[in-house]
Amino acid sequence: MPINILIQLSQGFSEPPKTTKQKADDFLVQAADKYEIGDYRGAILAYDEVIRLTPNNSEALFYRGNAYSALGDKQAAIQDYNQALKINPNDAQSYLNRGNVRDDLGDRQAAIQDYNQALKINPNYAGAYYNRGLVSSALGDKKGAIEDYNQALKINPNYADAYYNRGNARYNLGDKQAAIQDYNQALKINPNYAQAYNNRGAARGDLGDKQAAIQDYNQALKINPNDANAYYNRGNAYATLGDKFQAISDFQQAAKIYQQQDKNENYQDALNRIRELQQ
């Protein structure tokens, strides 16, 4: 009797074997955890197992593509997004991310086609409008970019990056006041947006308000003390106001950071400004 009871107890507490789907789900959780901490190689290995167990798992292919992209293997990422889209042709996110990778590889027209597809599937995809705006702007179509940022902001009125980049496009088209309004909105949403302070400073400086520009550069540098552009721009503002000493100091700081960042053209430009002021 004791033996039989022990056998029954043992059988009562034994777990049934996991199904293939349960095993795949376990690997999915493991992969997500590894991705979260930046262990992209570990995540890829876990996604490999998910795909081995469930070959038509478009979610695993999508996320493995993201991991490959994070590691810089853009071609492998594209292959995974392609495969995910074969399985699920209505996956707007896969189109968006494939577009991002194609843009990284310099194929901007293909990137725009992917964003178009993402928007065909999901017309309320603010991120797709925003990314298409960025690529359109890079291709020189500032007006088209502004239209896309407008759409992104209709969908998501708290999209600070869309305000910031619409401001940049307006600045490049010469509408400095409208640019300042956009930078104001970006800063209202994100008060720690150093680049928005820097660019608002540039617009204010162009409109002749050098003191306000300097205040913006000061704010940018409070948030990001390694913002070489803010040092450079503040140096220009001080130079215009006749404060050569402070201008040279800012150009020296800008040159130092540009050199550390391997931005040789910017570095040489900052050195040239120092030489001009020392004459």
Image (cartoon, helix red, strand yellow):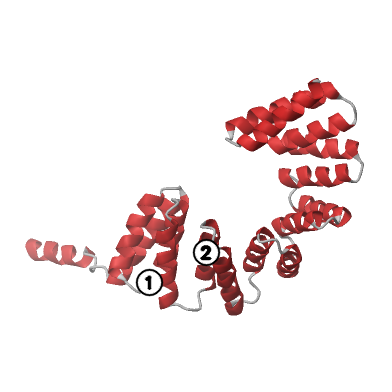
Q: Which mark is residue 57?
A: 1
Q: How many numbered discs sit on the rendered protein?
A: 2
Q: Quadrant of the C terminus?
A: top right
Quadrant for residue 165, please give it.
bottom right
Q: Nearer the viewer, residue 210 or 185?
A: 210
Q: Which mark is residue 210?
A: none
Q: Nearer the viewer, residue 160 or 198?
A: 198
Q: Which mark is residue 97?
A: 2
Residue 9 horizontal/vertical position (percent): 18, 64
Alpha-carbon neighbours of circle 1 within 10 Å: few (<14), some, or many (≥20)?
some
Seen at 79% across and 31% down, the residue is 235
Q: Nearer the viewer, residue 23 or 121?
A: 121
Q: Quadrant of the N terminus?
A: bottom left
Residue 236 horizontal/vertical position (percent): 81, 34
On the question of residue 126 being in view, the answer is yes
Q: Amino acid at mark 2?
A: Asn
On the question of residue 250 being in view, the answer is no
